[in-house]
Image (spheres, coloured by chain):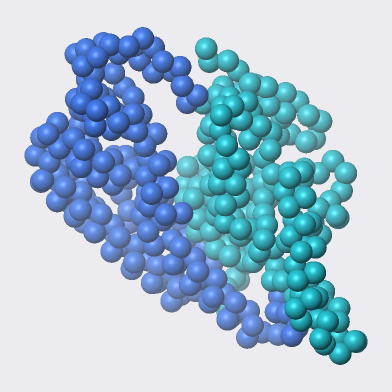
Chain colours: A cyan, B blue
């Protein structure tokens, strides 16, 4: 009964190809997406297709699955930036938010603005009554350090210097090795699945 | 990530059990298991093995590396080397803890094994502390940590990454630049 599942392919160059996965591989992918999302300092690409396939497998599974995946309040913490990213997303790029999350983020923003207005801004002098949430709310810190494990060998990854005396140098990432490095340099590798955050 | 979550991941590891019941093959999302026949060894994930043991439906077999002499060798090797040596299992700590807590009657020399594993753990976390210390002192930008298990990384990881983040912020704020992320108040 190990049926195979059709999953839209991750390769966005060739359009959406169907990738056939066994349920075990699907669970692996979900786990990897969970761990990457947990350790990344910013909101990663939404893997709703994986989640939907798992939901099909377990119809009695609750909404907790999706909430557990994005469980550390990243949407609430970074909401104006998340919505800005959605707005400026070009056609064809994968979205970071599922439709429900998008609605949640918008409502959260509207509620926060109303709250700030009613509690504080109304009582400020008229020329100070606007608040730019994009500037008021801290951005995700992409310079955070993360631990990662390499799934596909990468060459010539640039490591930026920490002090003035040091210079940039490049490293190769061997398959199976583990590293501690700043998130910014390897962010595209997380998105492509070449490394796994741990 | 807390230790319970690392243990959750560790529970996927396969161990051998000897069931005392029979059951046809079962089809789980993670893969097929069984069939189960009394007295015949079968491989199952750790979470299932522990559950069956608690319901007294099976006997657990110690993994091949959970043996007094092998672990003494590993411990001595770890103490000698300055870097981290590969461990017999990526989840040696979790496996030992769960197996010894729930099935110590099935594991020979359980107490000595517990002590040996603790020694190995202590040696490795001491090395980790030393290397984290030199990482911070020398303000390195990158570290390679092969052969470290997830539980070890997780135990000191959150503190280390937060400390490094703070230091990075302090350092970059020393040099005023246009691209600095500080926000105007």
Q: Nearer the viewer, residue A20 or B26?
A: B26
Residue under the point 70% across and 68% down: A139
Q: Residue at x 64, y 58 (%)?
A: A74
Q: Is residue A82 above or below residue B137?
A: above
Residue A193 percent coordinates (x, y) = 62, 41
Q: How many labels sit on residues?
A: 0
Residue A78, percent across and down? Answer: 69, 63
The residue at the point 49 percent across, 65 percent down is B161
Outermost residue to the right = A127
Res. A136 visible in picture: yes
- The image quarter containing residue B173 is bottom right
Q: Looking at this view, is A150 or A165 the one in front?
A: A150
| Depicted A85 relative to depicted A22: above or below | below
Quarter assignment of residue A93: top right
Q: Is residue A166 at all visible to an observer of this figure?
A: no
Left or right: B2 as drawn, with respect to A75: left
Q: Is residue B10 left or right of residue A94?
A: left
Front one among B103 and B12: B103
């Amino acid at each position: 009964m190990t049926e195979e599942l059709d999953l839209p392919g991750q390769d966005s160059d060739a359009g959406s190809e169907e990738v056939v996965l066994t349920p075990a591989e699907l669970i692996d992918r979900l786990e990897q997406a969970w761990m990457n999302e947990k350790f990344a300092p910013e909101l990663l690409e939404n893997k709703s297709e994986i989640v939907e396939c798992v939901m099909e497998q377990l119809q009695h599974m609750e909404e907790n699955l999706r909430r557990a995946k994005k469980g550390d309040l990243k949407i609430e913490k970074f909401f104006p930036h998340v919505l800005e990213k959605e707005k400026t997303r070009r056609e064809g790029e994968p979205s970071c938010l599922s439709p429900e999350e998008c609605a949640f983020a918008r409502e959260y923003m509207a509620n926060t603005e109303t709250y700030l207005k009613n509690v504080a801004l109304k009582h400020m002098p008229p020329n100070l009554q606007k608040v730019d949430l994009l500037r008021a709310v801290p951005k995700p810190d992409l310079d955070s350090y993360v631990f990662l494990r390499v799934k596909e060998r990468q060459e010539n990854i640039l490591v930026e210097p920490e002090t003035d005396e040091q210079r940039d140098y490049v490293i190769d990432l061997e398959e199976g090795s583990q590293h501690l490095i700043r998130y910014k340099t390897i962010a595209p590798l997380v998105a492509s699945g070449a490394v796994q955050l741990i | 990530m807390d230790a319970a979550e690392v243990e959750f991941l560790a529970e996927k590891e396969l161990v051998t059990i000897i069931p005392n019941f029979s059951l046809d093959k079962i089809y789980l999302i993670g893969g097929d298991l069984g069939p189960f026949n009394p007295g015949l060894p079968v491989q199952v994930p750790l979470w299932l093995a522990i559950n069956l043991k608690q319901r007294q439906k099976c006997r657990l077999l110690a993994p091949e590396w959970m043996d007094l002499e092998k672990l003494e060798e590993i411990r001595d090797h770890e103490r000698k080397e300055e870097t981290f040596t590969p461990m017999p299992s990526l989840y040696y700590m979790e496996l030992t803890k769960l197996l010894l807590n729930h099935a110590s009657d099935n594991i020979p020399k359980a107490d000595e094994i517990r002590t040996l594993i603790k020694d190995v753990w202590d040696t490795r976390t001491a090395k980790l502390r030393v290397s984290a210390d030199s990482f911070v002192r020398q303000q390195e930008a990158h570290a390679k940590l092969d052969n470290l298990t997830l539980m070890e990384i997780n135990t000191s990881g959150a503190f280390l990454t937060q400390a490094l983040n703070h230091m990075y912020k302090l350092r970059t704020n020393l040099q005023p630049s246009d691209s600095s992320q500080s926000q105007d108040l």
